[in-house]
């Protein structure tokens, strides 16, 4: 579909059993579907290399793109920048909202960055995240 422009007609063939059906459908741009959080990242946003992600403070604009949160605020994982050391559980995923690091509440990217910088490089990190309306803990062990 990427070879078509919005407004073009796409010729589609569908097989139903042994019968071939042909359709000409308009190519439309939809406003629905999963949000593209990486599109919200600006040049002033810096990655969080210790977690291997790029985070954005959950503000009104970002909140509007998310399902109703269980906990207000936090930091949205907008994109992954690199694989981090293997976590003990699920890794961070795009769309996760970070609410706490080692039991300390995280309200924005600045508080997340400060908290990460306060930990020694060999400290394990336990992250409370909200994923699809459910709270999870993600553990990352450091060398």
Image: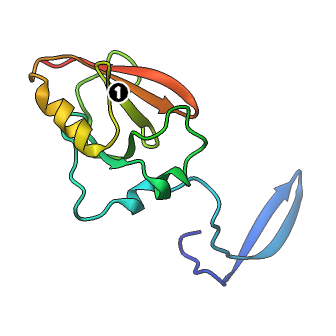
Point 28% across, 44% down: residue: 109
Question: Can you identify the residue that label 1 sits on?
Answer: 100
Rendered position, 104 above or below 28: above
Residue 115 locus on image (x, y percent): 20, 31
Local SS, label 1: strand
Instruction: Say whether residue 129 is left or right of residue 3.
Output: left
- Residue 121 in view (yes/no): yes
Residue 33 locus on image (x, y percent): 62, 56
Instruction: Say whether residue 79 is left or right of residue 82.
Output: right
Q: Dividing the image into 4 quarters, which one contains the C terminus?
A: top left
Residue at the farthest bottom position = 7
Point 22% across, 48% down: residue: 47
Q: Dividing the image into 4 quarters, which one contains the N terminus?
A: bottom right
Q: Quadrant of residue 139?
A: top left
Rendered position, 21 above or below 138: below
Point 41% across, 62% down: residue: 39
């Amino acid at each position: 579909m990427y070879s078509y422009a919005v407004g073009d007609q796409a010729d589609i063939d569908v097989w139903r059993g042994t019968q071939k059906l042909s359709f000409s459908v308009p190519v439309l741009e939809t406003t629905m579907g999963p949000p593209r959080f990486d599109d919200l990242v600006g040049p002033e946003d810096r990655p969080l290399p210790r977690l291997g992600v790029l985070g954005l403070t959950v503000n009104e604009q970002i909140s509007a793109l998310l399902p109703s949160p269980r906990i207000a605020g936090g930091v949205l994982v907008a994109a992954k920048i690199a694989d981090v050391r293997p976590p003990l559980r699920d890794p961070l995923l795009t769309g996760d909202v970070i609410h706490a690091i080692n039991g300390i509440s995280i309200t924005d990217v600045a508080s997340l960055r400060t908290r990460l910088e306060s930990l020694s490089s060999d400290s394990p990190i336990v992250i409370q995240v909200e994923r699809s309306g459910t709270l999870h803990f993600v553990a990352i062990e450091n060398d």
